[in-house]
Amino acid sequence: MGKSFRRSLIIALIASSSVFMDFQILFIVGSIGLAFVFSALSITSLPLALKRTSFQQKVLGVGVFFSGVELPNSILEAYLVSVGVI
């Protein structure tokens, strides 16, 4: 894995943990940080997914990539619905 992918993944995990805290400033900073880092993580991981699949499995690799991108978004949305924010 590339350095930018690892770095983005670590920062995304840290930023996502700050989203679940009760402090409002940490929530705002964590949400903004998570948006930027998750974008960088998505951009760096698609070429990695395409590189590791064979020619016949490119469509499957892109489909798995997009489902993996939507999974954290769905988890965060389910949490916000359960808390009553949405």
Image: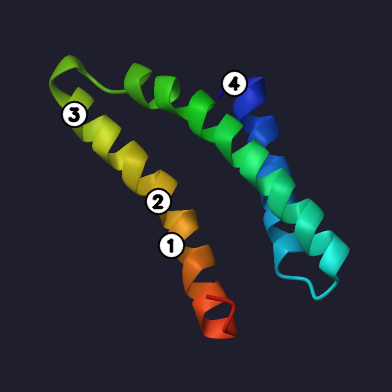
Q: Are marks 1 and 3 in contact (CB under 8 Å)?
A: no
- Disc on the earlier residue, 3 or 2: 3
The picture places residue 13, in percent across and down from the top left corner, at 68, 51
Q: Which mark is residue 70?
A: 2
Marks 3 and 2, how far apart in space? 17 Å
Q: Which mark is residue 74?
A: 1
In percent of the image, x 29 and y 41: which residue is there? 64
- Mark 3 sits on what residue? 59
- Disc on the earlier residue, 2 or 4: 4
- Mark 4 sits on what residue? 2
Q: Are marks 2 and 1 in contact (CB under 8 Å)?
A: yes
Tag 1, which secondary structure? helix
The picture places residue 53, in percent across and down from the top left corner, at 28, 23
The picture places residue 23, in percent across and down from the top left corner, at 86, 71
In percent of the image, x 50 and y 78: which residue is there? 81
Q: Quadrant of the N terminus?
A: top right
Badge 4: residue crowd in 10 Å (few <14, some 14–19, many ≥20)? few
Three-letter amino acid code at disc 1?
A: Ser
Marks 1 and 3, how far apart in space? 22 Å
Tell me if 59 is positioned left or right of 83 in this view: left
Tag 3, which secondary structure? helix
Q: Quadrant of residue 18?
A: bottom right
Tag 4, which secondary structure? loop
Tell me if 7 is positioned left or right of 78 in this view: right
In percent of the image, x 64 and y 32: which residue is there? 6
Three-letter amino acid code at disc 4?
A: Gly
